[in-house]
Image (cartoon, rainbow, N blue to C red):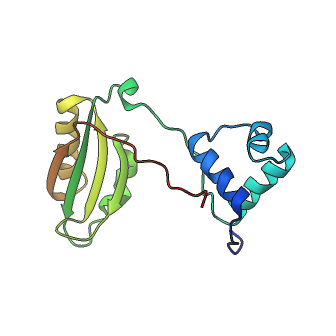
Amino acid sequence: MAEKSAALDRIDREILSILLDEGRIGWSELGARVHLSANAASERVRRLIRTGVITRFTAEVNQEALGRTLEAVIDVKVAPGNRFHDVLTECDEVLWLAHVTGRTDFQLHVACAGTPGLQRLLTRFRDEFGAAETTTTVVLESFRPSRPDVAR
């Protein structure tokens, strides 16, 4: 269970900024970059985890290297009471899912093996997962916005 969140100081913010770009950085290098010892830097990170500021460390995967050459954003409308999001853990193609307000119920970002893979996924959404309606937008190019400025 996370401790009560504490105010972040300048060093905490610098550590967060570095970890956002270099999550696998070693304690010695991290400490050197923020002018702390390796032990002090690691203790700061452990505290950020305990207080819930850092929730997890992840790897970024190149979808094309997995044969998923087409990305799309899919808006999904489901029947009331449908647990659409519960079954999506079975779909490796789904990169993220959001339960949203508006005309549709869910928005998904997917990566598929071309248009045949997208067609199979849409059919699966309808036939297995109960999607009543989908609207698909193919991603032509994507950009990563700059990381949030946590250093302020």
Query: Which residue is drawn at the image coordinates 49% and 50% (left, top)?
Result: 147
> Percent x, y for residue 42?
79, 49
Q: Residue furthest front?
A: 152
The N terminus - image quarter? bottom right
In terms of image quadrants, where is residue 2? bottom right
Question: Where is 126 relative to 63, above or below?
Answer: below
In terms of image quadrants, where is residue 132? bottom left
> Percent x, y for residue 117?
23, 33
Question: Where is 18 relative to 87, above or below?
Answer: above
Question: Where is 145 relative to 10, above or below?
Answer: above
The C terminus - image quarter? bottom right
Q: Nearer the viewer, residue 140 or 9?
A: 9
Q: Is residue 82 left or right of residue 150?
A: left
Question: Where is 124 relative to 113, above or below?
Answer: below
How many circles with numbers are drawn on the protein?
0
Q: Is residue 97 left or right of residue 1?
A: left
Q: Residue furthest bottom?
A: 4
Q: Is residue 147 left or right of residue 49?
A: left
Query: Which residue is drawn at the image coordinates 83% and 48% (left, top)?
Result: 36
> Percent x, y for residue 31?
79, 44
Query: Which residue is drawn at the image coordinates 46% and 34% (left, top)?
Result: 61
> Percent x, y for residue 88?
35, 52
Query: Which residue is drawn at the image coordinates 65% and 37% (left, top)?
Result: 24
Q: Nearer the viewer, residue 34 or 84?
A: 34
